[in-house]
Image (cartoon, rainbow, N blue to C red):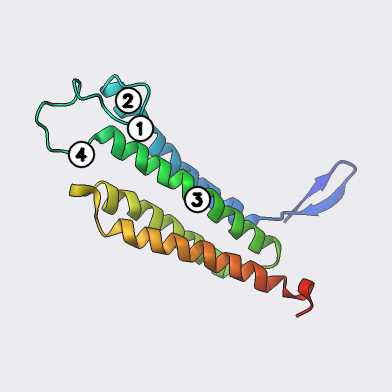
Amino acid sequence: MSSTLGIGVPVPKMLPVTGAWTLPFTAYLILLSNRVAYQRVKNKTYLGDNIPEDTAAAGSSKSDPLQLETRSHGNFVENVPFAFIVAAIAELNGANRKVLNYALASLLILRIAHVEIGIKTPGSMGIGRPLAFWGTQSFVAGFAAYGAYLVKGYWGY
């Protein structure tokens, strides 16, 4: 599980678990991005987060689909990169790979739930929103603490 650097020096793969999880997270990000693009083209709204009043159905009580899609995409982009950073730091410092795999799988499920059974439900307040919010916050705090624990020797403990 290594590759060679320049003159044949073997270099181990540094982030195999985090690297493996980039594919499903990226696939979901691409889906979210395409949903935004679809709403923009469908409603001829190429700038901004909302469908203009004159374009939206008159008297419609439904939520603005463009705003829902942009917030779904935005929430994913706001939370996942930092979660990946703390996971990668923990992995670089010797985190248990099994724990890391389960945690990243859980994070992906939480982020999907945030959109699919949270934002996309009637009223945009499905159970997925609070679950994903608290779950993602717990993931970030937990892996930040785990990463600090893994390097406790650096601080003399």
According to the image, label 4 marks what residue? 63
Q: Is mark 2 on a helix, strand or loop?
A: helix
Which three-letter amino acid code belongs to the residue tagged 4?
Ser
Circle 4 crowding by C-alpha within 10 Å: few under 14, some 14–19, many from 20: few
Check the image and name the residue furthest to the left: 59
Indicate which disc residue 40 carries: 2
Check the image and name the residue furthest to the right: 7
According to the image, label 1 marks what residue? 36
Q: In this view, does 47 lie above or below 102?
A: above
Spatial CA distance of label 2 from label 3 is 24 Å
Q: Is residue 99 left or right of residue 55?
A: right
Q: What element carries label 3?
A: helix
Give whichever of 154, 52 is nearer the camera.
52
What residue appears at the point 50 percent right and 50 percent down from the top-left corner?
A: 80
Which three-letter amino acid code belongs to the residue tagged 1?
Val
Q: Is mark 4 on a helix, strand or loop?
A: loop
Which three-letter amino acid code belongs to the residue tagged 3?
Val
Q: Foreground mark, 3 or 4?
A: 4
The spot of residue 93 in percent (x, y) is 71, 65
Evaluate if marks 1 and 2 touch, with contact meaning CB atoms under 8 Å apart. Answer: yes
Q: Which badge, 2 or 4, comes first in the chain's sequence?
A: 2
Tell me which corner region of the image, top left, top right, bottom left or bottom right, holds residue 134.
bottom left
Spatial CA distance of label 1 from label 4 is 15 Å
According to the image, label 3 marks what residue? 80
Q: Which badge, 1 or 4, comes first in the chain's sequence?
A: 1
Q: In this view, does 55 lie to the left or right of 20?
A: left
Q: Which badge, 2 or 3, comes first in the chain's sequence?
A: 2
Evaluate if marks 1 and 4 touch, with contact meaning CB atoms under 8 Å apart. Answer: no
